[in-house]
Amino acid sequence: MFKRILIANRGEIALRINQACRELEVETVAIHSTADAESLHVTYADESVCIGPPASTDSYLNITAILAAAEITGADAVHPGYGFLAESADFAEMVAECNLTWIGPRPESIRLMGNKAEARRTAAAAGVPVLPGSSGPLASASEAVALAAELGFPVILKASAGGGGRGMRIARSAAEVENLFSTASQEAERSFGDGAIYMERYLVEPRHVEFQVLGDRFGKVIHLGERECSIQRRHQKLLEEAPSPALTPELRREMGEAAVRLTASAGYENAGTIEFLLDLDGSFYFMEMNTRIQVEHPVTELVSGVDLVKEQIRIAAGEPLTADAGFEGGVFEPRGHAIECRINAEHPDSFAPSPGLVTTFHPPGGPGVRVDTHVYEHYRIPPFYDSLVAKLICHGRDRAEAIARTRRALDFFVVEGVHTSIPMHQRILRDPDFVAGRLSTRFMERFPAPKKRS
């Protein structure tokens, strides 16, 4: 096991990694920008290093400064969390060149599965269904228009090198393809340093269902079930749950086997997520793989009993995978139901960011409630980073109890001084379509507008 891990991230995920290290009796090093000097991930680390000013490019994306921090503090491994450099194969290689262990998949796996066009080809070769689309990046808008005519409208343009909704555009006509191609490419270039774009047929009312996978260096690969991630705004997830209310045991087995087959075919080690689109008729299609821990990983932890971050660290340390030790016959069965609400510092109606001083912070508790957060009373939320304040995760014996506990926890969650998305989540949890499990990636488009406040 490692002696000291540098956490190359900030906020709640940095604190979450710190917690896992504490249980494993591994020391931690926190890095931080000047804007994050008072953050809890810094407070609870064994050692901390300021790596630059607030801008991410000068701090959390500054590879030279991060590696220097690892060297001067005597770290022997680096955990990247999610976001920032978590899916940078170049960073992973540089970590290894500095005689440090990268807690994540091998750089070649990040490159293979991180490039969406290459990942599609890998999935197809593994016998995993993929949506009809381009075989690789498109060379021009005219090529995109010609292919769209073959596929039929609507189509979706996607960045080959990234995700999170950036570089993604839906086109419903040839004129829209021509107009949106350059826009998508420019956004992809700004976000990922790579403007390559590929195309797929667009499903109008799909569900977004993803499978958590784990692989070790001994060739063992398993899945820990699925997460329903259909409630999104502009391709950004707002609420996740496990298991999906749409999956039968048979469909879970079929999709899980496909996820494991693809993961194994990529020679993948550590934690990852295989994302699928599930159509109304039960057909499913590979969308992409995220080669890191996910924001929504806690719902899987609650229905599996597996600490995914500790499992990541153990795998990177060369230990064999044991996460399926409690499975009946080696087959995963979810234990109850879990729901995660992403509580963001933003206006619940307009989604406008709301950084500033948190004057009151009272997180909820009680049976089945977990809150992952780096925020505390009188903490100042900086305007420079993602607006995530906390993740509220609630577990129940079944979906109805998980919904009831999430409603109760949201009602008891008090944050003052900044706007948060709590009122939006309260409305979602009481929406008849949500309660009935009638979900799709277009859920928020049909979600009723909030009543005007007097």
Image (spheres, rainbow, N blue to C red):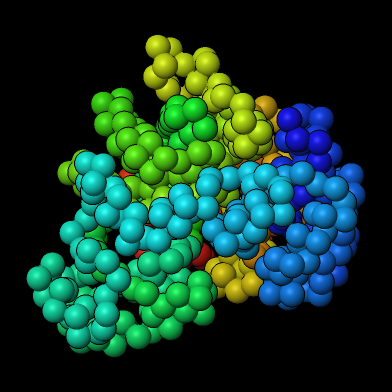
Residue 93 sits in which quadrant? Answer: bottom right
Q: Residue at x 34, y 54 (%)?
A: 119
Answer whether residue 40 is visible to the viewer in this image.
no
Location of residue 313 in the rendering, given as x and y in whole percent from the top left corner? 66, 36
Q: Residue at x 55, y 73 (%)?
A: 350
* 182, above or below 12, in the image: below
Q: Which residue extends farthest top?
A: 329
Query: In this rendering, would 364 be left or right of 326?
Result: right
- Left or right: residue 271 compared with residue 159: right
Residue 159: image quadrant is bottom left
- 442 relative position to 175: left or right: right
Residue situated in front as seen by the camera: 324 or 26 = 26
Tell me: residue 183, above or below residue 165: below
- Quadrant (top left/top right/bottom left/bottom right) for the N terminus: top right
Q: Is residue 220 above or below residue 148?
A: above
From the viewer's side, name the closer residue of 131 and 373. 131
Q: Measured from the top left, where is residue 199 in percent x and y? A: 26, 68
Residue at left offset 78%, top offset 66%: 65
Lateral position of residue 281 relative to residue 159, left or right: left
| Residue furthest out toward the left | 150
Is residue 345 visible in the rendered image? The answer is yes
Rendering coords of residue 346 (x, y %): 64, 67
Dividing the image into 4 quarters, which one contains the C terminus? bottom right
Query: Which is more toward the observer, 245 or 385?
Result: 385
